Image: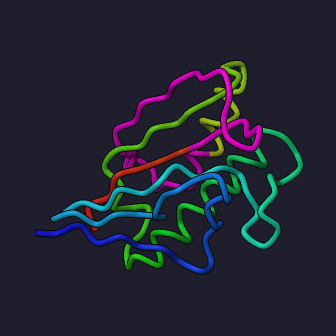
Amino acid sequence: MNPEFLNFPDAPPPPPTAAYSHAVRSGELLFVTGQLGVDPKTGALVPGGTVAQTRQVMHNLKTVLRGAGTSLDRAVMVRIYLTNFADYPAVNAEYASHFAPGRLPARTTVGVTALALGGAVEIDLIVRP
């Protein structure tokens, strides 16, 4: 089966220096590109720090998933990238609030030195649509 490359007008567009699709459907899996806390209307990071960015990241992920005909509750694997691990508890709390209790996907959290656009957090995921 050939992969299906998906892009959605309501999701933040890739910056001019980046080349990617919002998601790729391959077989029974949907791979969603890492999202930053970018406001889709302005293309800029939302103000308010790491928690506000995390909230926007989750909104952006939900937008991509909705466009692909699925939802966050179908996520099977998540990767979170943080530029400051001191933010882990706050990011974890905001992230967890978007899932039903007991329905958390597998997850990896990685500390990184920098993210695109100076973001504080980026999250990608794999979904079984």
Highlighted range, magenta:
95-122
Q: Where is residue 114? Give x, y as percent.
A: 68, 28
Residue at the spot x=58%, y=45% of the render? 95
Say above or below: 30 vs 106.
Answer: below
Say above or below: 46 vs 2.
Answer: above
Task: Tell me if 34 is positioned left or right of 46 in this view.
Answer: left
Q: Where is residue 55? Give x, y as percent.
A: 69, 53
Q: Nearer the viewer, residue 39 or 7?
A: 7
Q: Where is residue 52? Give x, y as percent.
A: 78, 49
Q: Residue furthest front?
A: 17
Q: Quadrant of residue 24?
A: bottom left
Q: Where is residue 51? Give x, y as percent.
A: 75, 42
Which part of the image, by quadrant, shows the N terminus? bottom left
Task: Tell me if 65 is positioned left or right of 63 in this view.
Answer: left
Residue at the spot x=54%, y=45% of the render? 123
Q: Nearer the viewer, residue 84 or 113?
A: 113
